[in-house]
Amino acid sequence: MSHLHPALPWLVAGLLLLVAEILAPGVFLMWLGLAALGTGALVLLRDPGFAVQVVAFAVLAALSIAAGLRLRLRRRGPRPHVNTAESGLVGRTARALAFEGKEGRVRVGDSEWAARLASDAHPPKPGDILRVRGVDGTVLVVGP
């Protein structure tokens, strides 16, 4: 029986991980598959001991995952903030749900929000239509 080359398990594992990534995208197995293929290439070029192979795989896995995360963040760009004026909440209409003094809850579109009345606004009745004047963290500032 012929002896298998020591790089073969790394290369097969790398290819299997890449196939698994294709079958279940988003699992992030691609980066581990690339690390296994890199380790297999190292074993083909130089035949290091098993301990060196494991360390090489760990280093390549860490580097490839870091590269993948960096690419993912760069592709997304800055994360949008839901509670900013730029997100389109300021100026929208809100329906009063319940208010106790200046604090209460409103509905904007299909979402319910905590709300605070602007300084010049009087407490609304449930169902009254208000306008979003500003956003303070996760609280909408509303008024007539």
Image: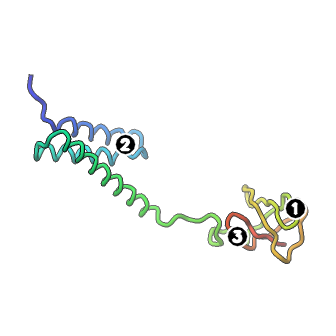
Residue furthest out toward the left: 2
Q: Secondary structure at mark 1?
A: strand
The residue closer to the viewer here, 76 or 22, is 76
**How crowded is the residue under tag 3: few (<14 C-alpha within 10 Å), some, or many (20+)?**
some
Q: Marks 1 and 2, Cα distance to the nearest angstrom? A: 53 Å
The colouring scheme, among rainbow, by chain, secondary structure or one colour, is rainbow
Residue topped by disc 1: 100
Quarter of the figure with residue 101 = bottom right
Query: Which numbered disc, 1 or 2, marks the residue that appears first in the sequence?
Result: 2
Query: Which numbered disc, 3 or 1, marks the residue that appears first in the sequence?
Result: 1
What's the residue type where badge 1 is placed? Answer: Glu
**Residue displayed at 36% across by 44% down:** 29
Where is residue 20? Give x, y as percent. 36, 38
Residue furthest out toward the bottom: 120
Q: Marks 3 and 2, Cα distance to the nearest angstrom? A: 41 Å
- From the viewer's perspective, is 104 left or right of 22? right
What's the residue type where badge 3 is placed? Answer: Val
What's the residue type where badge 2 is placed? Answer: Glu
Q: Secondary structure at mark 2?
A: helix
**Residue displayed at 82% across by 68% down:** 130
**Residue displayed at 18% across by 39% down:** 50
Q: Which mark is residue 12?
A: none
Q: Nearer the viewer, mark 1 or mark 2?
A: 1
Quarter of the figure with residue 95 = bottom right
Q: Secondary structure at mark 3?
A: strand
Q: How many marks?
A: 3
Residue topped by disc 2: 21
Q: Which mark is residue 135?
A: 3
**How crowded is the residue under tag 1: few (<14 C-alpha within 10 Å), some, or many (20+)?**
few
Query: Which numbered disc, 3 or 2, marks the residue that appears first in the sequence?
Result: 2
